[in-house]
Image: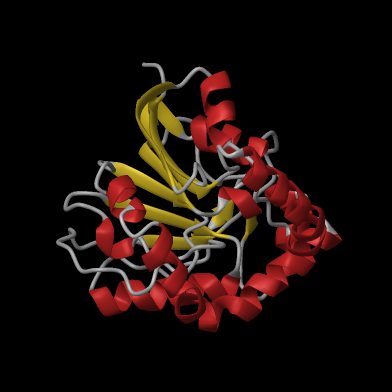
């Protein structure tokens, strides 16, 4: 489930071969011992385990409907606004890497060789596009359905955790960040990029007005800053860029060892 400013076709790069799986993953919701198989044909079970509300279910179906046209419709925006953001993020990944809310897989060809990639996506149709993209690229990655708010992994599983242009649409972004840091090993690297509130107050006021409509209707937030939460959680900022009147922000922050 990526949003807002997705990439046009991603460029090619050298990536180690990994296994693309259609296996049904097992979800272990945070704070629960419950286990259930996630399946594209079982949205009710996913909703029950992840605490997905009827509103969440409606938003999820909306992302499913957008999946086929997503890259084409949004590519021009990415080329204009943040063509270098995805490469900036992905080249910093290493080791066991988790991408949360990977959408249609626009980051897949950008990861360096040696990355052992796992991807989680909320929308079944977006995930299907990502899996096809991985197969076309000849990549092998563990791409599965899941919820950013209840990641199906043990604490400290990954060396790197990535999210690009998706936090703005996660129903509970603080919980998602908590989960991302939970599955990040001590000393691991968190990589984020998103559109955020502008550093110019007139644009920021406009974004707040837009949020009045987009948050209830589309689950989309324009006036937010994930970096505040990252710093409050005690992660150490290693790299940071904010461009386009402050509306595009990317960061690399390390969890304490």
Please state the total of marks drawn on the protein image. 0
Q: Is residue 52 visible?
A: no
The structure residue drawn at horizontal position 58% and vertical position 39%, both measured from the top left corner, is 200
Q: Assign the C terminus to one quadrant of the image.
A: top left
Judged left or right of residue 185, residue 64 is right
Q: Assign the N terminus to one quadrant of the image.
A: bottom right
Q: Is residue 142 above or below residue 133?
A: above
Where residue 45 sits, quadrant-wise, is bottom right
Q: Residue furthest right?
A: 54
- Residue 245 image position (x, y, % from top left): 49, 45
Judged left or right of residue 20, residue 124 is right
Q: Residue furthest front?
A: 202
241 vs 104, nearest the viewer: 241
The structure residue drawn at horizontal position 56% and vertical position 62%, both measured from the top left corner, is 3
- Residue 104 image position (x, y, % from top left): 46, 70
The structure residue drawn at horizontal position 18% and vertical position 49%, both measured from the top left corner, is 114
Judged left or right of residue 209, residue 84 is left
34 vs 99, nearest the viewer: 99
The structure residue drawn at horizontal position 31% and vertical position 76%, both measured from the top left corner, is 135
Instruction: Name the image colouring.
Output: secondary structure
Where residue 123 sits, quadrant-wise, is bottom right
Q: Is residue 106 visible?
A: yes
Q: Is residue 256 above or below residue 47?
A: above
Judged left or right of residue 106, residue 169 is right
- Residue 39 image position (x, y, % from top left): 61, 69
- Residue 236 image position (x, y, % from top left): 40, 20
Where residue 134 sits, quadrant-wise, is bottom left
């Amino acid at each position: 489930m990526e949003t807002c400013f997705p990439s046009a076709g991603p460029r090619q790069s050298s990536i180690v071969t990994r296994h693309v799986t259609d296996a049904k993953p097992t979800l272990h919701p945070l704070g629960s011992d419950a286990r259930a198989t996630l399946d594209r044909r079982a949205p009710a079970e996913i909703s029950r385990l992840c605490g997905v509300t009827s509103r969440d279910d409606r938003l999820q179906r909306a992302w499913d409907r957008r999946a086929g046209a997503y890259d084409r419709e949004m590519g021009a925006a990415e080329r204009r606004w943040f063509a270098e953001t995805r490469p900036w993020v992905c080249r910093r990944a290493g080791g066991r890497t988790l991408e949360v809310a990977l959408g249609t897989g626009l980051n897949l060809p950008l990861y360096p060789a040696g990355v052992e990639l796992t991807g989680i996506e909320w929308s079944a149709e977006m995930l299907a596009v990502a899996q096809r993209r991985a197969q076309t690229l000849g990549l092998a990655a563990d791409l599965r359905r899941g919820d950013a708010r209840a990641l199906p992994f043990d604490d400290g599983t990954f060396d790197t955790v990535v999210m690009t242009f998706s936090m703005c649409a996660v129903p509970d972004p603080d919980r998602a960040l908590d989960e991302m840091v939970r599955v990040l090993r001590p000393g691991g690297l968190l990589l984020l990029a998103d559109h955020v509130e502008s550093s110019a107050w007139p644009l920021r006021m406009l974004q707040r007005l837009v949020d009045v409509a987009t948050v209830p209707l589309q689950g989309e937030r324009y006036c937010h800053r994930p970096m505040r939460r990252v710093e409050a959680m005690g992660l150490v900022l290693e790299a940071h860029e904010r461009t386009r009147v402050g509306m595009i922000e990317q960061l690399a922050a390390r969890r304490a060892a």
